[in-house]
Amino acid sequence: MFQILDYGLMNYGFVKVASAIPRVRVADCAFNASQIEKEIIIADGKGVEIIVFPELCLTGYTCGDLFAHSLLLESAELGLMQILNNTRQLDIISILGVPVPLNGMLLNAAVVIQKGKVLGVVPKTYLPNYKEFYEKRWFTSASEVMEPMVRLCGQNVPLNACLLFDTAGTTFGIELCEDLWAPIPPSSALALQGAEIIFNLSADNEGVGKHNYLRSLIAQQSARCIAGYVFSSCGFGESTTDVVFAGNALIYENGTLLASGKRFSFEEQVVTSEIDVERLRTERRVNTTFASCRAQTAQGVARHVATEYVNARDLQLTRTFDPHPFVPQGPMLDERCEEIFSIQVSGLAQRLTHTQAKSAVVGISGGLDSTLALLVCVQTFDKLGLSRKGIIGVTMPGFGTTDRTHSNAVDLMESLGVTIREVSIKDACLQHFKDIGHNPEVHDVTYENSQARERTQILMDIANQTNGLVIGTGDLSELALGWATYNGDHMSMYGVNASVPKTLVKHLVKWVAENGMGEASRKTLLDIVDTPISPELIPADEDGNIRQITEDLVGPYELHDFFLYYFLRFGFAPSKIYFLAVRTFKGVYDEETVKKWLQTFCRRFFNQQFKRSCLPDGPKVGSVSLSPRGDWRMPSDASSALWLNDVAPL
């Protein structure tokens, strides 16, 4: 019990796996065994816990009628014994493709070995017997095998297509090549019965367009099973009499490709990565469909096989993590921005239509969030065939408003052709300070929040005047940190940015600027993108520049969005988030800086829940949302102690 817990803590739920493509000589088992052995040793040296090899790698897949010769089968068993003997000191678990004789039958099987022992044998279920495949000529399907055990290399070992292998860190299952292509692959049942990683030994030959289909198939199956999927298929050295094998080494995690080998390589390959089984477990717990499907399948079919417990090694993480998980890279960015913007527009259009509102009222500060909200309003009115004059943009200069943001706000509204109103909040706030006995020279939370609430009151009253809706501007990152004034900018009648994180807001505004709002608007929009993020509640400096920089106060939004993604999307502990962030932002933020802002995130996220418990409606645009009606339901008085204590020792 304690050993397994220690393993998980040291490795943060990651299991290092490998897909190997050895060089083979058809029917030369001694040569093949030496090549396999070499790759096992290489992988073990890299800290790999489980390695998989191609289908029938010990003999070669393309032996044909030579599989009927006892000399080949005996040589294969001798080769397996050689591998067992020469790797008995290694901790690594190896999965090899071997022809296994059994009571007058021959099985195309995966043999699982570790520390000189055969742990189990998994025979192939679906034998292709069409076009270039003739496997039923030599092999028997697992569905026709009744024996629960097989004797191999002097050991009596479990034999079943539904074996689950339990290690200290995970449970894995195995299927072979054609099994994956079946309408209901064995891996589906294995996953429902506990397999978190599926290993596939394959002899998939090449054909035009087939590789893309294969990758799509593996991605889909790993996603449906919410599992890791490690695929290894035959490569150079197999017979090319009629077909060619390119050697595919692929590692997926829940639909995402983590690592791949080089196709058509003439050299052997060992492709490694780390599968995050903790993440997979979280996904399965959250996904109620997975549990429902599991409940409808027969239980108790799979047999569990215990592997040898080994001491965990320090994790050397080779996979990388996107520092901006909410922001897709490359050509996908434009597509994602268009999709998100369309969701926001559709959400607002439905709300305006349903309420029969005559106007949309938006407070325009010259900052990113209010700019995005205004752009959503403009596009919505255009699509509904309404005059942009029905959009009332209200700029409300206060004590901290700078010329740059005020000019940008006015210029943007003019270029978009919306109705412009300007209402200064200075006199009203000074009167309010006088009424409550607050010294306006004391720039504390009362000074700041009074301005935010005054602005919200103005917007609400203008909406009442014009039979309209106040459109909220606050974003997901601000909601996570509670960076909003309760019943101030926290409140609106519909929050179009509610599930858009700060790191994505900038890209959305830039995308709109470059995709059809006109040259006059474009220039202003790009300057807004470059403006420091600030609530502008504290007076500017002597040069008129913004003094109150948000990220100086609460921390960099790129860090907080990283924290938010892994905290909310996958339920990771702060210690694991820290582990990932330190490596992801190496050279950008040092360890102390990451820890400081992670503590801030945890503290604020818990302390500010009361603001999220009464949020206005707003559209969900991605996989993470903090709506109290949907994605995130948390007591406002939940303790943050457990999470802060997890950060403290780092």
Image (cartoon, grey):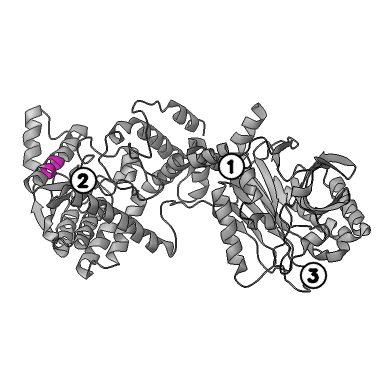
Regarding residue 94, the answer to whether it shows in the image is yes
The reply, left or right, for residue 136 in relation to residue 339 is right
State which quadrant residue 380 falls in.
Answer: bottom left
What numbered label is drawn on residue 536? 2
Q: Secondary structure at mark 1?
A: helix
Residue nearest the viewer, comparing 215 with 473: 215
What numbered label is drawn on residue 239? 3
Residue type of the residue flagged with mark 2: Glu
Residue type of the residue flagged with mark 1: Val
Query: Mark 2 touching mark 3, by CB under 8 A?
Result: no
Q: Position of residue 125 (x, y in %)?
A: 72, 52
Q: Nearer the viewer, mark 1 or mark 2?
A: 1
- Looking at the image, residue 406 lies above or below residue 538: below
Residue type of the residue flagged with mark 3: Ser
The reply, left or right, for residue 242 in relation to residue 594 is right
Q: Nearer the viewer, mark 1 or mark 3?
A: 3
Does the stretch in magenta take in 456? Answer: yes
Q: Which residue in the protein does label 1 denote?
A: 277
Q: Secondary structure at mark 3?
A: loop
- Tell me which label, 1 or 2, sits earlier in the chain: 1
State which quadrant residue 214 falls in.
Answer: bottom right
- Our reading of the magenta stretch's main secondary structure is helix
Magenta residues span: 455-460
Query: Mark 1 touching mark 2, by CB under 8 A?
Result: no
Using a 10 Å C-alpha cutoff, classify the residue at mark 2 as few (fewer than 14 neighbours), some (14 to 19) or many (20 or more).
Answer: many
Name which residue lies at 77% across and 72% down.
Answer: 240
Q: Position of residue 511 (x, y in %)?
A: 32, 62
Q: Position of residue 109 (x, y in %)?
A: 78, 51
